[in-house]
Image (spheres, rainbow, N blue to C red):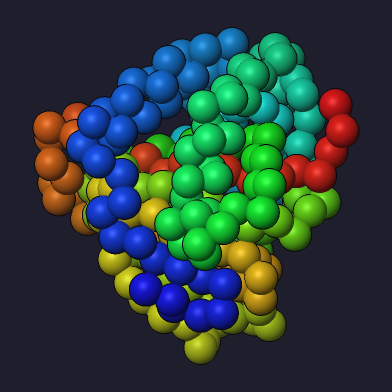
Amino acid sequence: RQIAPGAVHVPGWLSPDEQRDLVAACRAWATGPVPIRHTVLPRGGVMSVQTVCVGWHWRPYRYTRTADDVNGARVAEFPRWMVGLGRRALVAAYGEHDGYTPDTALINFYDGAAKMGMHQDKDEKSDAPVVSLSIGDTCTFRFGNTETRSKPYTDLLLASGDLFVFGGPSRYAYHGVPKVHPGTADPATGPARGRLNITMRVTGLAD
Ligand code: MD3
Ligand code: FE
């Protein structure tokens, strides 16, 4: 399950009940103070993925408390139970959590056609690990290197319930989602269609 140093994949980590509870929480955030939306990039591009945030609002390429690029509202609080979930994820991947205290989560929704291009996550002022949880349709996930957005990379499938933790030397690796495979989810646990990905992070920001 170690894909590269610091990159650990734990298939089927979330129980069906945990997946259903997370879908319900994400549905509430998606219709919360800052509604889920397609992020608009500074040069005018529109991301095919839809995103809603808790704790801190991410917009390219910084974190803020209010969603000034959406409706100006303050984002929902980062829930305490999610800190617990993040710590359990680190224990599952690394055997210890080392006081891990995530303060933001980005929730990405992929419909059948959405993708995410190869990128690094560098907007956090902390090199603490990123915890990723997948729910719903399976995707092809592309895990690359820290130098370039092209080869060498490894493609793997992320299915509903899978945990992936990216820390240490993998924290700044390029990665992306070239394809979601429609209709591959179990309707009993996932969203009615599409794929949800929740990433927890430490922004390194103080209020
Ligand atoms: C490797 N999300 O939100 S999750 C993102 O499935 C993002 O929605 C993808 O990339 C998704 O930024 C991929 C896996 C992931 C997330 C964060 C990482 C891999 C990562 C940060 C550093 C290295
Ligand atoms: Fe990313």
The reply, left or right, for residue 151 in relation to residue 109 is right
The reply, left or right, for residue 112 in relation to residue 56 is left
- At 75% across and 59% down in the image, what residue appears? 127
Residue 174 picture quarter: bottom right
The reply, left or right, for residue 10 in relation to residue 66 is left
From this viewpoint, which residue is outermost toward the right? 206
- At 21% across and 37% down in the image, what residue appears? 16
Quarter of the picture containing the N terminus is bottom left
- Is residue 64 visible in the rendered image? The answer is yes
The reply, left or right, for residue 47 in relation to residue 42 is left
- The image shows a total of numbered marks equal to 0
Query: Height in image: 97 above or below 62?
Result: below
The answer to which of 18 and 185 lies nearer the viewer is: 18
Quarter of the picture containing the C terminus is top right
- At 34% across and 21% down in the image, what residue appears? 24
**Residue 80 location (% of width, % of height):** 58, 25
